[in-house]
Amino acid sequence: MTVKDDYNPETEQYTLTISQRTPATPDQAEKQPLHIPFAIELYDNEGKVIPLQKGGHPVNSVLNVTQAEQTFVFDNVYFQPVPALLCEFSAPVKLEYKWSDQQLTFLMRHARNDFSRWDAAQSLLATYIKLKRRPSSARAAAVSAGACG
């Protein structure tokens, strides 16, 4: 699954676009989209969960992804949020999303569920290990300082 997001401070809307693709198998060249429960949480800059809303009504934090690509728009998001995706390991899928090192460190500190904290730590550690293999990586030192500071 691939996730892309966008935040519009003028409209105070946060948009998540979720795409799914199932590779072909010998017996089935073209796969239909699956129904995937996709649990999310959005955090403000203080680490508080932002209630999910659309049109003034609360929205369930488990999104039902049933199409190859779906867009979810949330209202009344007053700050650029940090998303926690697949909270509580809501679906056994491979996730592609470009978190910054700062966002991962933030999730390690503030995410309410154990899986999101663990996953953020694993992602940050994998980045650090890959960068550490390169000689004198300034970014690896920055990642290390951010995670431990």
Image (cartoon, helix red, strand yellow):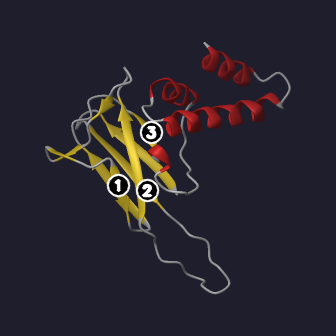
Residue 3 percent across, percent down from the top left: 47, 51
* Residue type, numbered disc 2: Ile
Label 1 CA crowd tier, 10 Å (few <14, some 14–19, many 20+): some
Label 2 CA crowd tier, 10 Å (few <14, some 14–19, many 20+): many
* Residue type, numbered disc 3: Ala
Q: Nearer the viewer, mark 3 or mark 2?
A: 3
Task: Look at mark 3 in the image and give the residue it sits on.
Answer: 84
Comparing 69 with 84, the one in front is 84
Quadrant position of residue 104: top right
Comparing 24 with 98, the one in front is 24
- The structure residue drawn at horizontal position 42% and vertical position 45%, both measured from the top left corner, is 5
Comparing 43 with 99, the one in front is 43
Quadrant position of residue 122: top right
Local secondary structure at mark 3: strand
Task: Look at mark 2 in the image and give the residue it sits on.
Answer: 18
Using the image, determine if residue 4 lies above or below residue 148: below
Quadrant position of residue 82: top left
Using the image, determine if residue 148 lies above or below residue 130: above
Q: Identify the mark nearer the N-term, 1 or 2.
A: 2
In the drawing, what numbered circle is on residue 63? 1
- The structure residue drawn at horizontal position 47% and vertical position 60%, both measured from the top left corner, is 19
- The structure residue drawn at horizontal position 74% and vertical position 20%, both measured from the top left corner, is 138
Quadrant holding the C terminus: top right
Q: CA distance from mark 1 to mark 2?
A: 10 Å
Question: Left or right: where does residue 123 sit relative to residue 92?
Answer: right
Residues tagged 1 and 2 counted as in contact (Cβ below 8 A): yes
Residue 134 percent across, percent down from the top left: 83, 30
Q: CA distance from mark 3 to mark 2?
A: 14 Å
